[in-house]
Image (cartoon, coloured by chain):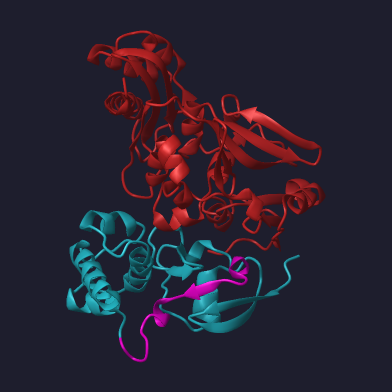
Chain colours: A cyan, B red
């Protein structure tokens, strides 16, 4: 009734094939088949955003996407952000501005913020809050997360100016 | 939480999707953004044997203006509504609404057609479609039909669509130039459904109401058109007193159910308050 199918996608720049049942959720494929455990399983109900990954240039909650829907997709997870051993500006920002405590939400938060800054390199604090509202953090109260995103925004603007 | 097993289909044309729907009938569900259906499947509220994913059908996406009508493909996502220049210029009510729906990740996936077809009174587009006088193109094996939003929503999770049909397009008559508009939505948190919300489209000449359209979200088994309030306001000066009376008439038609968002009385009061706020904001935005 639901035989397995091969699904091919690019994961952080690497061509990847997996064989899955249609009902398998993308978060499980990433964590259990691809050993990418950066995206976390928080609520499993599309609320918390801990499982956020970038799919074809959009942020998605990978607990609410079927792996079969990722056929041909370009996927980016937190594992793909650091380049050549150098942290991405967002990772550096979260460290410098203490944008985390327990760190559980951080991979999803950073992956979402990555897409936000792609779309809006110079956001106001209010815009940062509005556009990361799909990611919940129970530790920080968000103040330092906003500062961390702004740290990265400044650094990235400087780097590309 | 993982859904029960099903067979997955990803057609690339409307015709192929209709064929699959005809073959698998009541065993099949259409998958749009999936942010209502997949959670329901995880919780076993829905257990389709066949899932027909519409995301690969490019002809179901896009926003265009044709004459005095806006055509929106049913698989156009909320985020594309937010950034559409056509909607910014000709139908900002829809942009305002989309910005208040759920959160950014959900808005990249969630579609206007899915929101409308699901028939959930908590969804925001049904009331806005009633407010705008929209119509829906339903395509089936025997051809197309166009159905008005008014009359489309029959009850909780129930609409006028037939099992072998697909909602392919939303058609919205461009509101008269200078119309005021507002979608006022009360929600407990980002991502929650409305406790109550009101959509208003308002045409003023001086202080007098030429025409007004009011529709309410999540205070009945379907979105509700507040026709008594509309009738009261037409050809009347839009005074503070008139707005208060219109809000009272709007809350009279509400029939909400008590849940974690509040009691019946509270929700009715909030529907009145949202109507009140939406009328005030629409009046401030209207060109006279």
Residue B144, image x, y percentages: 74, 36
The residue at 39%/13% (across/down) is B210
Residue B191 position, x and y percent, is 38, 50
Q: Which residues are magenta?
A: A67-86
- Residue A4: within the magenta? no
User: Which residue is the extreme one toward the bottom?
Assistant: A84
Residue B139 visible in the current orientation: yes
Q: Residue B87 sits in which quadrant?
A: top left
> In which quarter of the view is residue A83 placed?
bottom left
**Residue at 61% across, 72% down:** A72
The image quarter containing residue A22 is: bottom right
Looking at the image, residue B26 sits to the left or right of residue B270; the answer is: right
**Residue B187 percent coordinates (x, y):** 33, 41
Q: If the image is split into quadrants, where does the C terminus of chain A sit?
A: bottom left
Taking the magenta stretch, the answer to whether it contains residue A85 is yes
Which x, y percent locates residue A134? 36, 58
For the N terminus of chain A, give its image quadrant.
bottom right
Name the foreground residue: A156 vs B194: A156
- B92 vs B258, nearest the viewer: B92
Q: Is residue B34 toward the left or the right of residue B211 in the image?
A: right
Residue occupying image coordinates x 58% and y 34%: B171
Which is nearer the eye, B264 or A81? A81
Q: Residue at x 74, y 52 (%)?
A: B17
């Amino acid at each position: 009734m639901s035989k397995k199918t091969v699904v091919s996608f690019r994961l952080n720049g690497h061509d990847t094939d997996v064989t899955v049942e249609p009902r398998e959720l993308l978060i499980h494929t990433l964590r259990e088949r691809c050993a990418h455990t950066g995206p976390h399983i928080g609520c499993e109900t599309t609320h918390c955003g801990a499982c956020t990954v970038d799919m074809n240039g959009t942020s998605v909650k990978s607990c609410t996407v079927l792996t079969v829907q990722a056929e041909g997709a370009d996927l980016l997870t937190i594992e793909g952000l650091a380049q050549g051993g150098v942290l991405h500006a967002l990772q550096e920002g979260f460290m410098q501005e203490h944008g985390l405590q327990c760190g559980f939400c951080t991979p999803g938060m950073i992956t979402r913020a990555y897409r936000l800054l792609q779309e809006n390199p110079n956001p106001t604090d209010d815009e940062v809050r509005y556009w990361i509202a799909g990611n919940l953090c129970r530790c920080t109260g968000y103040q330092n997360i906003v500062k961390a995103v702004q740290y990265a925004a400044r650094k990235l603007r400087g780097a590309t100016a | 939480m993982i859904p029960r097993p099903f067979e997955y289909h990803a057609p690339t044309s409307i015709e192929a999707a209709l064929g699959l729907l005809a073959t698998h009938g009541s065993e099949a569900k259409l998958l749009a953004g999936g942010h209502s259906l997949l959670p329901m499947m995880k919780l076993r509220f829905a257990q389709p044997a066949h899932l027909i994913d519409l995301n690969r059908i490019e002809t179901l996406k896009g926003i265009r203006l044709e004459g005095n009508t806006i055509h929106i493909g049913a698989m156009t996502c909320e985020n594309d509504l937010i950034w559409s220049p056509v909607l910014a210029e000709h139908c900002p009510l829809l942009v305002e609404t989309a910005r208040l729906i759920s959160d950014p990740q959900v808005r990249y996936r969630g579609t206007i057609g899915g929101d409308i077809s699901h028939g959930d009174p908590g969804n925001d587009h049904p009331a806005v479609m009633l407010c705008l006088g929209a119509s829906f193109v339903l395509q089936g094996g025997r051809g197309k039909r166009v159905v008005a939003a008014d009359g489309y929503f029959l009850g909780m999770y129930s609409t006028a669509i037939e099992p072998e049909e697909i909602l392919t397009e939303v058609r919205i008559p461009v509101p008269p130039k200078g119309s005021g508009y507002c979608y006022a939505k009360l929600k407990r948190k980002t991502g929650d459904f409305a406790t109550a919300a009101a959509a208003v489209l308002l045409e003023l000449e001086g202080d007098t109401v030429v025409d007004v359209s009011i529709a309410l979200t999540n205070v009945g088994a379907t979105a509700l058109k507040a026709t008594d309030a509309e009738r009261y306001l037409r050809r009347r000066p839009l005074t503070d007193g008139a707005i208060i009376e219109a809000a009272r008439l709007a809350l009279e038609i509400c029939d909400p159910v008590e849940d974690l968002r509040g009691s019946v009385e509270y929700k009715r009061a909030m529907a009145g308050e949202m109507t009140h706020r939406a009328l005030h904001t629409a009046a401030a935005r209207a060109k006279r």
